[in-house]
Image: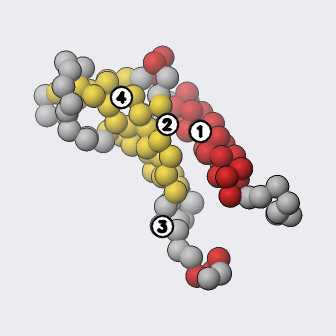
Amino acid sequence: MTTDEVEVSALAINVAIPDELQWTDSRREVTFRLTTLNVRLLPDGRLAAKAYGRPVDGGRGAYTSFPVPDRPELTGLIGEAAKVAAERWRSAYAPEHDAR
């Protein structure tokens, strides 16, 4: 199989949101503290990010996604996380002798 024959639909990373960048949002009268980002690199090169968390009042809560606010510090977190993920992929799947 060649690289032309492999179709990757998306790449995804999960990113822990540092305490100082976390925020709350509500859905169906339940307030959630958002603690994790799921960031996907789509085939067309766009990023799609959603935030997830747990209800502030406790309990499991539903796996409910929230939009990520347009804040420079969150954009920076996503950018840094992408760099870390890229390096991990490179390290795991590009042997040292590979001349890429």
Residue corresponding to mark 1 = 81
The image position of residue 28, as x and y in percent, is 14, 34
Could you say which is closer to the camera, residue 69 or residue 53?
Answer: 53
| Residue carrying label 3 | 9
Q: Nearer the viewer, residue 27 or 6?
A: 6
User: Could you say where residue 84 lies in the image, as x and y percent from the top left?
Assistant: 65, 40
Mark 1 or mark 3, earlier in chain = 3
**Residue contact at pointers 2 and 1, CB within 8 angstroms:** yes
Q: Residue at x 49, y 23 (%)?
A: 18
Which label's residue is closer to the chain start, 2 or 1?
2
The alpha-carbon separation of the residues under discs 4 and 1 comes to 17 Å
Mark sitting earlier along the chain (3/2): 3
Q: Position of residue 72 (x, y in %)?
A: 55, 30
Kind of element beneath mark 4 = strand
Q: Up-down: is 76 above or below 100?
A: above
In the picture provided, is 76 more to the left or to the right than 42? right
Residue drawn at 39 percent across, 43 percent down: 50
Q: Nearer the viewer, mark 2 or mark 4?
A: 2
Mark 4 sits on what residue?
34
Report if the CB atoms under discs 4 and 1 are less than 8 Å apart.
no
> Up-down: is 80 above or below 54?
below
Would you name the residue on which mark 2 appears?
15
Q: Secondary structure at mark 2?
A: strand
Mark 3 neighbour density, 10 Å: few (under 14) some (14–19) many (20 or more):
few
Horizontal side of residue 99 vs 76, given as left or right: right
Gap in Å between the C-alphas at discs 2 and 1? 7 Å
Q: Can you say whether 7 is above or below 93 in the image?
A: below
